[in-house]
Amino acid sequence: MIIRYLGHASLQIRTKDVTILVDPFISPNPQASHIDINTLDADVILITHGHADHVADVKAIADRTGATIVSNFEIVEWFGKQGVEGHPMNHGGQKEFEWGTVKYVNAVHSSTLPDGTGGGNPGGFVLWNDEGCVYIAGDTALTMDMQLIPFSCPAVDLAVLPIGDNFTMGYADAEIASDFVKCDRVLGCHFDTFPYIEIDHDDAKDLFSQNNKELILLEIGKEIEV
Ligand code: NI
Ligand code: MN
């Protein structure tokens, strides 16, 4: 799996000949102005929850590419009324697709859609196939539910965790979360996009390295392999 950071909580995952986007919020993000959503490939779009900073570019990309969205029932219904195809899930449910298995897991946050429609309860995803296993926490607080993931999913190779604090857990709680999911390799997201969530990168990385873990902070557009 190749995982490319597209800014904020947006990812592009290439695996098994498909391209999966996660929470595309690119065109409204000035820090991602060098990423053109009109050139992004997508076969699948995973949406953790309904907030605008996670769904802003979903419709434009899905309309152009024909990508299928995967999210909770309420969000898939909302996009369905706009002509976007989707696969609905809900918490604790797992589905095997041709390109991998997805489990929709708990997150502690909120999920109202941009027009005020209820977006169900927020979630995260565990995505795995024979290339690896990635936990995408979505916007969430540190929660004991994360401890369930190692019991019901393969060993997590990379945990994508929010670290910006204020709206989600900060990096100190993310370091604890990495213990809960038993994964020492963390890709940070949901930081620096807005003044409320600006963090000190060195302090964050130092905390992880003091605990013999790796916190990866990618420049927008750069990628890592799992
Ligand atoms: Ni949110
Ligand atoms: Mn958010």
Image (cartoon, rainbow, N blue to C red):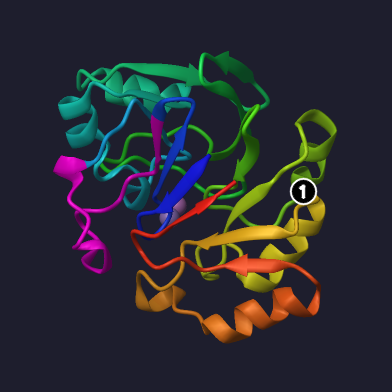
Q: Amino acid at mark 1?
A: Val
Residue nearer the viewer, 18 or 162: 18
Query: In the picture shown, does residue 50 fall above or below 62?
Result: below
Q: Give me the residue at 62% from left, 48% from top.
A: 108
Going 43% across and 54% down the picture, which residue do you hit? Answer: 9
Residue range in magenta is 19-39
Residue 38 percent across, percent down from the top left: 14, 41
Where residue 117 sits, quadrant-wise, is top left
Between 162 and 216, which is closer to the camera in this rendering?
216
Q: What is the residue that sits farthest to the right in this orientation? A: 151
Ligand 2: give its quadrant. bottom left
**Residue 30, located in which quarter of the rendered image?**
bottom left
* Secondary structure type for disc 1: loop
Q: Is residue 106 visible?
A: no
Residue in the image at 43% along x and 17% along y = 87
* 221 lies left or right of 27: right
Residue drawn at x 33%, y 45% is 24
